[in-house]
Amino acid sequence: MNWIYEPWPWYIAGPMIAFIMFLLIMVDKSFGMSSNLRTLCTMCGAGKKTDFFKFDWKAQKWNLIVATGTVIGGYIGANFLTSELAVAIDAKTISKLNTLGFASAGNAYLPKELFVITNSTGAFLNVKQVILLGIGGLLVGFGARYAGGCTSGHAISGLSNLQLPSLIAVIGFFMGGLLMVHLIFPMIF
Amino acid sequence: MRTGIYLFIGILFGITMFKSEAASWFRIYEMFSFDSFHMYGIIGSALVIGAIVVKTIKHFKIKSFYGEAITFPNKEKGFSRYFFGGIIFGLGWALAGACPGPMFALLGAGFLPIGIVILAAVLGTFLYGVVRKKLPH
């Protein structure tokens, strides 16, 4: 059973994701995580501002429960199923990231240079990092709704159902990602 | 009962995202640098198996666990919204290093600054709702 503490290889994780999509289909639902962001807007009263958020959010309660489960799953994965948090990324990636100033590449799960936003006493807040995280989130939320889905809704559910719009969206995902990593990262890091 | 099933599915998903490191910013960077097969293997195998699952359900008209007919609604036709929305999403995916599913898993894993990303993503969704009618779809 030691393998469970090791990082899961792609040939375990990929089939698991397909299995999760299968389970959701079999309980009359579908796989799509970014819909929850819209539901959260509606719960916060965004329906008063624009019609896009005027819907019965209780019909989406099931998906919020899936998201809650995802939070719990993350907790279980990090606290009970992982002995080594460092992600063993490729040596080429590590050297590229070192050049950009990410010294934590290869030694952490998330880059400390982006996700540790306070010093040890919590007194100092790194504003640049907070802004970058905020912009990242903003783009994800805006883009996912504009495109009508995210990685789960388009790359997994949509492509599995051979939907051309999902292929266009996934091509967009990659164009955006490549643009960010190769063009914008050297400017901001 | 159903709540328990949804919760179980979510837990399975969260564990998978965390343990496969699909929730790691580093894996996303590595993917966009074409340095490893890992993420391509995850997404690729998920969608190949997924496509077989969908095809099988359609072919044999398999009913859901609750005896309902299963339908797969087609995505609305269009180009602009998928292309431009996709690019915007991709920019954020690479910067924050997380898409919506992994964000929730990271929150549970105790990486609290991901809360900023989640709140901003909710705000981004709201902004889309506000300017939606002015955008090409």
Image (cartoon, helix red, strand yellow):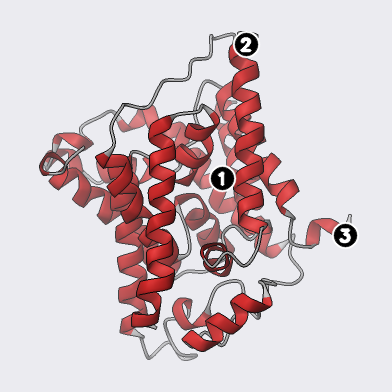
Q: Amino acid at mark 1?
A: Gly
- According to the image, label 1 marks what residue? A69
Disc 3 + disc 2, Cβ < 8 Å: no
On the image, the x and y values in percent for residue B75 come to 37, 27
Tell whether B10 sits left or right of A153: right
Q: Chain of mark 2?
A: B
Label 1 Cα neighbours within 10 Å, binned few <14 / some 14-19 / many ≥20: many
Q: Earlier in the sequence, mark 1 or mark 3?
A: 3
CB contact under 8 Å: marks 2 and 1: no
Q: Can residue A4 be seen here?
A: yes
Inspect the image, locate mark 3, and give the three-letter code of the amino acid beneath it. Answer: Asn
Amino acid type, residue under disc 2 in the picture:
His
- Residue visible at 53% across and 63% down in the picture: B28
Please indicate whether residue A23 sits to the left or right of residue A157 in the image: right
Which residue occupies the foreground of this view, A77 or A92? A92
Q: Quick check: A148 above or below B42?
A: above
Which residue is most to the right?
A: A1
Residue in the picture at 48% in, 57% down = B103
Residue A65 lies, with reference to residue B27, above or below; the image says above
Q: Position of residue A46 (x, y in %)?
A: 19, 44
Residue at 74% x, 56% y: name it: A8
Dot 3 crowding, Cα within 10 Å, few <14, some 14–19, many 20+: few
The residue pinned by badge 2 equals: B59
What residue sits 37% from the left and 61% below the top?
B92
Q: CA distance from mark 1 to mark 3?
A: 24 Å
What x and y, as percent, mark residue A27?
57, 22
